[in-house]
Structure formats: structure tokens, C-alpha cells
Amino acid sequence: MAKKVKKLRLILGDQLNHQHSWFKEEQDDIIYILMEMRQETDYTVHHIQKIVGFFLAMRNFAEYLREREHEVIYYHIND
């Protein structure tokens, strides 16, 4: 039996749009990945509250997708 190939879709922190066509229905062949990356905090000076809010929005969006049966991989800043 052939193994089903899955597509990996990277969602960046500035792409947290629940109305995007990608999320209209759950698809078995798609995995979404979101990553809290240190590079996002270091490329310029940011207030700590902005960074925390940014990562919290990403975490909430990942949970939103999971609640709608999407497959999600999420890497926290310390993973």
C-alpha cells in the first residue's frame, strides 16, 4: 500500500488569518507548522510585550486550527 504524501504549509507570525482559503475545511494531506523563532526577536529591537503578544497570537492560532481538526506542528521558543 502506498504511503500518503502530505504537504507542509509554513504559517508565519504575520499570516494568522483564520479567513484564509487554506482553512475553509480540514484536509488530511496538509500539515501546518508554526515556529517561535529567536530570529524573529533579534533582527531589530522590540519591546518584550510585543514579542510575548506575537508568540501568544501564534499559539492561539495553532489552537484554533487544532480545534477545527487541522493537523498542526508547533515549535515553542525553547523547543
Image (cartoon, grey):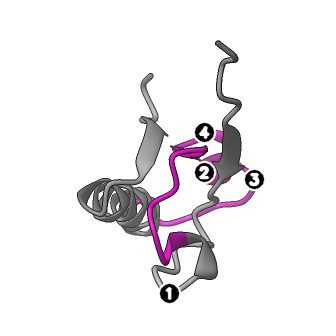
Q: Nearer the viewer, residue 52 or 1?
A: 1
The amino acid at mark 1 is: Gln
C-alpha span from label 2 to label 3: 6 Å
Q: CA distance from mark 2 to mark 1?
A: 26 Å
Q: Secondary structure at mark 4?
A: loop
Q: Which residue in the protein does label 4 denote?
A: 38
Residue that label 2 marks: 41
User: x%, y% of residue 13?
Assistant: 57, 63
Mark seen at residue 37: none
Q: Are marks 4 and 1 in contact (CB under 8 Å)?
A: no
Q: Nearer the viewer, mark 1 or mark 3?
A: 1
Q: Are marks 3 and 4 in contact (CB under 8 Å)?
A: no
Residue 64 x, y percent position in the rendering: 30, 65
Closest to the observer: 17 or 54? 17
Do tag 4 and tag 2 residues touch (Cβ < 8 Å)?
Answer: yes
Q: Is label 3 in a helix, a strand or a loop?
A: loop
Is residue 40 found inside the magenta-colored segment of the image?
yes
First to last magenta residue range? 23-48
What's the residue at 45%, 39% (across, down)?
Answer: 74
Q: Amino acid at mark 3?
A: Tyr
Q: Name the outermost residue toward the left.
A: 67
Asked whether the beta carbons under mark 2 and mark 3 sit within 8 Å of each other, the answer is yes
In the image, 5 versus 41, the foreground residue is 5
User: Residue 19: which numbered mark, if any?
Assistant: 1
Q: Which residue is mark 3?
A: 43
Residue type pointed to by label 4? Arg
